[in-house]
Amino acid sequence: MFTPSPQLYPFTSKWFDSSAGRIHYIDEGQGPPIVLFHGNPTWSFLYRGIVARLRDRFRAVAVDYPGFGLSERPSGYTYTPAEHARVIGELVDQLDLDGFVTMGQDWGGPISLSIAADRADRVRGLVLGNTWFWPADRLSTRLFARYMSSRRMQRRIIERNYFVERMLPKGVTRKLSDQELDHYRHAQPTPEARVGVAEFPRQLLAARPWLGELERRVAQHLADKPVQLVWGMKDFGFPATKTIPRIRRTFRNLALVELPTANHFIQEDAPEEISQAIEKRFG
């Protein structure tokens, strides 16, 4: 088991025995709870700068999905967003969180919103950044999904850790240090550990029915919740001009903070600005 650096990840690891296997998470600070959901190919390490800044005023919970970070890789697990939402929802219920805020980026957006929609009476607000919650409709997204689902690219993802070695650095404006990149490498150390990473791009198309139902559930149960958008303006995968208007059509109480120098992995590029936006909106 990989042990994170206490300098880079100065948090106490906790564990939850879910119906799918043992889940790793951190639970830092006291105050109104905020649950932080990562995307692909990351884990709770992505949120280290935000947790460190928020834990004086919030109870910050950051999770690792099964197959990611320090969580188990359960046999028989399907690594779909629907299953991630079901299993992490068990943790949210086990922690008995009430009046909580969710934050989701990349696949963390639909996963966090699915959990929130099922518990809308307990949700205080939503933070979303460089994400979506509807069936993939842009041609570029569909082409990306097909390309990454091809046999050749699936082999590169699983055998060469393509998402960590190539996609992650491309999605960060600043240069990750060797030690930071190693924390992402060591969280997916073997081909067997990368099955979940390889499945996410396939789910861009395979999860269309689930995403279509999620879009309906979000509009029905969450449209009146206060929403804070924090958006990396250099992200070509989720361009602000295309994505933010689509989100605005759903939510009635929405504030936006643009992150002009941030790319896709906004938590790496702009943890201070994101933390300030959360404190201003929900502190």
Image (cartoon, helix red, strand yellow):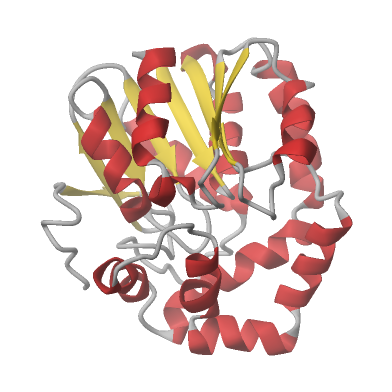
Q: Nearer the viewer, residue 73 or 229?
A: 229
State the count of labels. Answer: 0
Q: Position of residue 166 (x, y in %)?
A: 53, 76
Q: Position of residue 50 (x, y in %)?
A: 32, 38
Name the image quarter holding residue 71: bottom left
Q: Residue at x 48, y 57 (%)?
A: 173
Q: Residue at x 77, y 76 (%)?
A: 147
Left or right side of 133 for 281: left
Q: Position of residue 98 (x, y in %)?
A: 38, 16
Residue 184 showing in the rendered view = yes
Q: Nearer the viewer, residue 29 or 15?
A: 29
Left or right side of 90 for 104: right
Taking the view exactly as shown, the residue that stands out farthest to the left is 6
Q: Nearer the viewer, residue 13 or 277?
A: 277
Q: Nearer the viewer, residue 134 or 270?
A: 270
Q: Is residue 74 above or below residue 261?
A: below
Q: Residue at x 79, y 39 (%)?
A: 242
User: On the rendered image, what quadrant is the C terminus found in?
Assistant: top left
User: On the rendered image, what quadrant is the N terminus found in?
Assistant: bottom left
Q: Position of residue 57 (x, y in %)?
A: 22, 20
Left or right side of 182 for 142: right
Q: Is residue 42 above or below residue 199?
A: above
